[in-house]
């Protein structure tokens, strides 16, 4: 893929073909490369919630001030990031020798543990990097995207049962 061409081609699309559905395999092809997006301490803060069902997209559309691209796109990818991802360090590094795992766990705890603001900042940074990666991969797949922050966040959290320890980074509408 030519990254420059993908960046030049990418636009925030507002009108999507509502009849087009993404298959499971297309969705996998879209999301798998995004998992390679770098994160601080390799904590992989971000998670993806994908809405493809018409009824759920309609509810998300309402929560997005009736912006029709949410209803009409093939999939709405809601990127959420775990605020307390540093607490997973033991699991993430558990395959390493014990002394290295202990050192990395200690480092992440001392770096993030006492700063909710830093935890939130890193969650948003990691989620934003993942969002851009997703948009570039979508462009490579000849899909269009529309990144969005215009929504009623408490309503989106309620609709998608997003845990309290996660922050909504953005929604990305994907389709043609």
Image (cartoon, grey):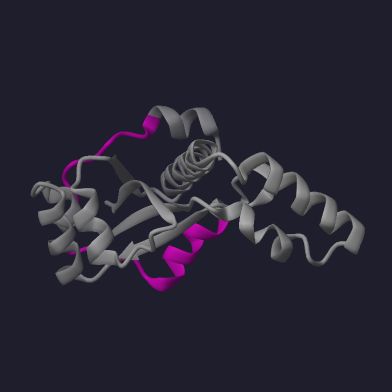
User: In the picture shown, does residue 100 fall above or below 145?
Assistant: below
**What is the quadrant of the N terminus in the image?**
top right
- The vertical placement of 146 against 34, above or below, is above
Query: Viewed as shown, does residue 69 lie left or right of 134?
Result: left
In the rendered image, residue 93 lying in the magenta stretch gets the answer no
- The residue located at (31%, 34%) in the rendering is 11
**Any part of residue 99 in sight:** yes
Residue nearer the viewer, 51 or 113: 113
Residue 67, horizontal then vertical, whole percent: 12, 46
Left or right of 49 on screen, residue 176: left
Q: Residue at x 70, y 66 (%)?
A: 91
Taking the image as shown, residue 103 lies to the left or right of residue 109, namely right
For this orientation, the residue located farthest to the front is: 114
Relative to the observer, which residue lies in front, 64 or 19? Answer: 64
Query: How far from the left and from the top, in percent, is residue 4?
Result: 51, 27
| Of 127 and 5, the residue lying toward us | 127
Where is residue 163 shown, x and y percent of the image? 39, 63
- On the picture, is 23 further left or further right than 140? left
Q: Position of residue 152 (x, y in %)?
A: 18, 48
Q: Is residue 17 visible?
A: no
Rendered residue at 27%/40% (across/down) = 149
Q: Residue at x 88, y 55 (%)?
A: 100
Tell me which corner region of the image, top left, top right, bottom left or bottom right, holds residue 52. bottom left
Magenta span has 22? yes
Which region of the structure is painted magenta? Answer: 9-33
């Amino acid at each position: 893929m030519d990254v420059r061409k993908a960046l030049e081609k990418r636009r925030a699309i507002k009108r999507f073909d509502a009849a087009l559905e993404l298959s499971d395999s297309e969705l996998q092809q879209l999301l798998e490369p995004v998992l390679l997006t770098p994160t601080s301490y390799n904590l992989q803060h971000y998670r993806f919630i994908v809405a493809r069902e018409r009824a759920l997209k309609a509810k998300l559309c309402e929560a997005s001030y009736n912006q029709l691209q949410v209803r009409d796109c093939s999939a709405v990818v809601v990127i959420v990031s775990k605020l307390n991802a540093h607490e997973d360090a033991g699991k993430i590094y558990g395959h390493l020798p014990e002394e290295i795992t202990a050192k990395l766990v200690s480092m992440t705890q001392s770096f993030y543990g006492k700063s909710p603001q830093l935890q939130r900042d890193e969650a948003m940074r990691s989620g934003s990097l993942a969002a851009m990666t997703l948009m570039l991969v979508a462009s490579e797949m000849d899909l269009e995207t529309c990144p969005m922050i215009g929504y009623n966040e408490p309503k989106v959290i309620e609709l998608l049962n997003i845990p309290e320890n996660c922050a909504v980074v953005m929604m990305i509408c994907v389709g043609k």
